[in-house]
Image (cartoon, helix red, strand yellow):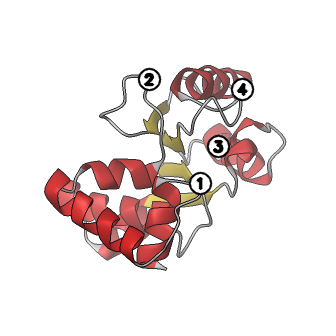
Amino acid sequence: MKSIAILHEGNDKGSLDAELIRRLLKKSLGLTDEQIKEQVEFYGMGMKSNFFKESHLPYKRLQQYVTTGVTKKILFIIDADDAKNDARYGGFQNTETELNHVIQRLGLQQISSAYIMHDPSTQNKTGYVESFLLSTIPSERRNCIMQFLACCGIELKEGDKSFYQRIFD
């Protein structure tokens, strides 16, 4: 069993979130693939709304591991999204409030931390992991990419999320 649990949107393998987390663990902490496999359990929570369902299966497994002392640290990584699209769970503040309520009701607050993904350039902290990644590209290059997409007639219906899906899928 693994002492660190990371809960993220998407599935356990193959999602942008899971791959980004693995790469950050390797680059930032210097962990090898083998060390990650030994120490970290990834929980793909699927849709964002699943984070707010205390009966969601990953929570049941995780609570067993916490109770038995196997899991010692938990990291929640979730998109802020936008409150315009979801008045209850959308936006940084709503996401943070609801996630903290769930963590508290599950009794995990002592060993948990959360990171809410958003575009750091927005004042109201809206966005997704895709927004965060786009914010790391110099604006000149980002503008070039957006002009290319517009020239090709590619419409981005979901903004940053669509951009990444079009480019990297």
Q: Nearer the viewer, residue 13 or 29?
A: 13
Pointer 4 residue: 87
Pointer 1 residue: 9
Nearest to N terminus: mark 2 or mark 1: 1
Callout 2 secondary element:
loop
Amino acid, disc 3:
Thr
User: Mark 4 against mark 1, which lies toward the viewer?
Assistant: 4
Q: On the image, which quarter does residue 1 sit in?
A: bottom right
Amino acid, disc 2:
Asn
Amino acid, disc 1:
Glu
Q: Is residue 151 above or below residue 126?
A: below
Pointer 3 residue: 68
Nearest to N terminus: mark 3 or mark 4: 3
Question: In the figure, is residue 121 to the left or right of 83?
Answer: left
CA gap between label 4 and label 1 equals 19 Å
Q: Nearer the viewer, residue 167 or 151?
A: 151
Contact between labelled residues 1 and 2, with CB atoms less than 8 Å apart: no
Question: In the figure, is residue 53 to the left or right of 117?
Answer: right
Q: Is residue 99 above or below residue 48?
A: above
Q: On the image, which quarter does residue 46 sit in?
A: bottom right
Q: Residue at x 52, y 61 (%)?
A: 156
CA gap between label 3 and label 1 equals 25 Å
Estimate the x, y position of residue 80 in percent, counting from the top left: 53, 36
| Residue at the outermost right position | 55
Whether residue 16 is visible: no
Callout 1 secondary element:
loop
Q: Residue at x 38, y 62 (%)?
A: 20
Pointer 2 residue: 124
